């Protein structure tokens, strides 16, 4: 199995401009208070989405959401959770999602954003070329699926693309791709299944993943990108700036994902955590909020060491799959 390390430095500001992200975070907290919390007594407890373990300890709370860490598979997840219909309504009616949509269509639809999507598609195409799947059928399931599908079409990555309804599509009148409401509406298995930045936002990502993996042809491939329970979340816990509860309902561990893929008959060809921001985010947050770290070793490393040491530490996190952003390429036998 391959592990990729990305060497060029990525600035936090480049990926998530702070003023936009802060505003998004503020709006989503307001939306949660107005739209989700009133139905809270209907929320359901869940087992670990990584391994179905029910014997799990509360790790911490954030903004009224309880986060559990599974000892069995090291997945972090929220419980109880609203049902998917309530969450979809929340995203459709909330101001945060509209803000994000406008942002993507205006400021962030710039070359920079396109570059990030294009580099993911280039990664997918290294495998589809290798296994003769380029130009085949494809399903994209992602909160920004329509934009990904448009670029895939342009690059002739696939001939027949269907997008599972992402929230953004509701706001777009000029949607040029085929869409279905649910992954279960896909009748014929696909050569390529792309699940990008999706699993962490779902109420039942385990079932969603098994459903999606069942819609892949033998010899076809699945590509997954998602937030994972890596260094940033492990060190900062409830203080992590990226741990916005409704966007991070489940942080699968790499091991949990590997197990689910193997159970579904897939060979994992690559599993990497190419996240490049963990150390920068942790150092920034610790300094700004004056947090005390539990480990004096970590404190010494993160606060007193120079940039050279810190960037090598980030590479170490990537190399040993401990960063907080994960990507997987797997092929169905
Ligand atoms: Zn588990």
Image (cartoon, rainbow, N blue to C red):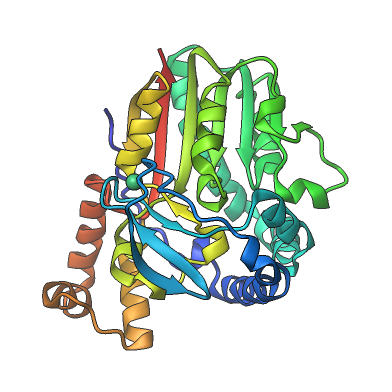
- For this view, does 333 lie left or right of residue 117? left
Tell me if residue 304 can be seen.
yes
Q: Residue 19 placed where, x, y %? A: 59, 76
Front in this rendered view, residue 49 or 157: 49
Report the residue at 35% width, 52% height from top.
8
Front in this rendered view, residue 267 or 16: 267
Front in this rendered view, residue 30 or 298: 30
Report the residue at 52% width, 65% height from top.
245
- For this view, does 28 lie left or right of residue 280? right
Report the residue at 54% width, 21% height from top.
214
Q: Is residue 328 above or below residue 287?
A: above
Report the residue at 34% width, 33% height from top.
258
Q: Residue 207 placed where, x, y %? A: 53, 36
Q: Residue 112 placed where, x, y %? A: 58, 54
Q: Residue 320 placed where, x, y %? A: 22, 46
Residue 326 position by quadrant: top left
Residue 198 position by quadrant: top right
Tell me if residue 133 can be seen.
no
């Amino acid at each position: 199995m391959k592990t990729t390390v990305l060497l060029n430095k990525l600035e936090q500001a480049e990926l998530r401009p702070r003023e936009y992200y802060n505003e998004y975070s503020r709006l989503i907290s307001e939306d949660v208070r107005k739209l989700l919390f009133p139905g809270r007594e209907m929320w359901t407890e869940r087992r670990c989405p990584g391994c179905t373990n029910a014997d799990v300890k509360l790790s911490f709370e954030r903004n009224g959401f309880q986060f559990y860490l599974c000892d069995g598979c090291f997945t972090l997840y929220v419980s109880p959770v609203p049902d998917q219909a309530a969450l979809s309504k929340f995203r459709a009616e909330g101001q945060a999602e509209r803000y994000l949509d406008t942002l993507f269509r205006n400021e962030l639809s710039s070359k920079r954003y396109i570059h990030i999507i294009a580099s993911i598609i280039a990664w997918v195409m290294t495998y589809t070329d290798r296994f003769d799947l380029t130009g085949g059928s494809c399903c994209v399931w992602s909160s920004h699926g329509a934009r990904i599908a448009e670029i895939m079409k342009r690059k002739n990555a696939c001939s027949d693309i269907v997008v599972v309804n992402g929230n953004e599509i509701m706001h777009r009148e000029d949607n040029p791709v085929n869409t279905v409401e649910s992954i279960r509406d896909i009748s014929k298995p696909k050569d390529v299944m792309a699940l990008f930045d999706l699993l962490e936002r779902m109420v039942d990502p385990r079932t969603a993943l098994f459903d999606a993996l069942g819609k892949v042809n033998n010899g076809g491939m699945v590509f997954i990108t998602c937030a994972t329970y890596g260094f940033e979340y492990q060190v900062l816990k409830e203080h992590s700036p990226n741990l916005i509860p409704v966007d991070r309902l489940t942080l699968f561990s790499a091991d949990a994902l590997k197990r689910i893929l193997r159970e579904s008959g897939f060979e994992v060809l690559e599993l990497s955590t190419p996240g490049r921001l963990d150390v920068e985010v942790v150092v920034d947050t610790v300094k700004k909020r004056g947090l005390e770290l539990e480990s004096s070793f970590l404190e010494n490393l993160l606060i007193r060491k120079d940039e050279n040491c810190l960037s090598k530490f980030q590479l170490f996190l990537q190399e040993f799959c401990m960063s907080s952003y994960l990507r997987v390429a797997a092929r169905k036998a």
